[in-house]
Image (cartoon, helix red, strand yellow):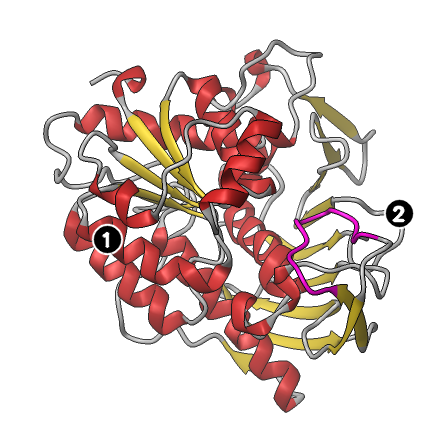
Amino acid sequence: MRVAEIRAGVVGVGFIGVAHVEALRRLGVQVAGVVGSTPERARAKAERVDLPPVVGSYAALLADDTIDVVHIASPNHLHAEQVLAALDAGKHVVCEKPLALTSAETAALLERATASGRVHATCFNVRAYPLVSQFAAMVRDGAIGAPRFVTGSYLQDWLLLDTDWNWRLVPDQAGGLRAVADIGSHWLDLARFVTGRRVVEVLADLHTFVPVRRHPAGPVETFAAADAGADLVEEPMSSDDAAGILLRFEDGTRGTVAISQVAAGRKNSISIEVDGAGSALAWRSEDPDQLWIGHRRRANEVLARDPSLLAPEAAALTAYPAGHVEGYPDTFRALFSAVYADIAARGASPAAAPPGDPGYPTFADGHDALCVTEAVARSAAEGRWVPVDRGAGPATATPPGGADR
């Protein structure tokens, strides 16, 4: 089977759903239809941004036997039931993070997806920057010595004002955690990916800096400003605007991360540094085509994205020559390229056993992230170090180069 023969459907027509559609089109995947919260809202959005045909309901999308893959980019509380329905319909599934609202749900989804034999992916797209993959390859190959300390942040400002609003601020739709679950989960997955080590214990301090928000009665799309002329409803807030988290990794490596959605001027700023016994590596999303390499007794280096200089797995993620910047939208293309290559390789045997190293984050990674963020919530509530409880359920994700990256 060729990638161009694969047909996909996308659930969700907000900011992320549109990003999925655009990336799939770049790959030549046929996007057969999209589903929104209502057909009317979906059609209005489709007219503005040239989306594929709107399907009247999720059930109708799943009933279409010509659709092979379902992309789930709906609000968080819908993920678990929509993933299960897609698997029951025999579809491959790509789901936005968080995979579900609880680790019990993600464990069940992982078990069901594994048993189905279908391709399953969690959309931790930050991994798909070429120099993030290069970062992971260099740590794995011992270029900086044994990792000792991991530091970084994920900062945004789109919820700085008390009139900023989105469904992510509603616990019933997003879950009890907000900044940590929404963007912090990306950073935590990134740290595990580049170090090849799992977080085993956390000490977290969560902050709600905007205790009351004012918002319109109707929905507000992610990153969109509320209608200044609308009547606003006051609502008390309980979820986290920001967090500081100390981390202990499984081999004794230590870490610390700052997460905020109220950092003025920071639109989507991710940074991570790993200090090793010999050297250090650092990467920033605002300058994604450069990897900083720190030394003690010689000049520091900057590795620019150049496919000819990268590890094979990093070079495989690149689509343009050196000097032609690849950014946020390219991460979806790169991630989906690996997912759809796997689907195409299975062809007429979609239930074949998954490869040992699929090269993209699976539901195992989505489950692992939920286990860590649940520990963050417990730590903040109890004011102490809390171990990450991965339970005795399905196998969790493994480090780069392992069975399930």
Residue 112: which quarter of the image?
A: bottom left
Q: Is residue 215 toward the left or the right of residue 389 in the image?
A: right
Along the line of sight, which residue is nearer the eye, 264 or 374? 264
Mark 2 neighbour density, 10 Å: few (under 14) some (14–19) many (20 or more): few
**Does residue 41 sit above or below 191 in this rendering?**
above
Majority secondary structure of magenta residues: loop
Q: Position of residue 69 (x, y in %)?
A: 29, 36
Q: Which residue is mark 2?
A: 265
Q: Residue at x 15, y 54 (%)?
A: 115
**Percent x, y of residue 137:** 51, 35
* Side of 228 relative to 281 (left or right): right
**Residue 109 position within the rendered picture, expressed as x and y whole percent measured from the top left:** 29, 60
Q: Which mark is residue 7?
A: none
**Rendered residue at 51%/74% (across/down):** 374
User: Does the magenta portion include 221?
Assistant: yes
In the depicted structure, whether residue 352 falls above or below residue 147: above
Residue 226 versus residue 129: which sits nearer the camera? 226
Residue picked out by circle 1: 113
Whether residue 137 appears in this view of the structure is: no
Q: Position of residue 228 (x, y in %)?
A: 86, 54
Q: Amino acid at mark 1?
A: Ala
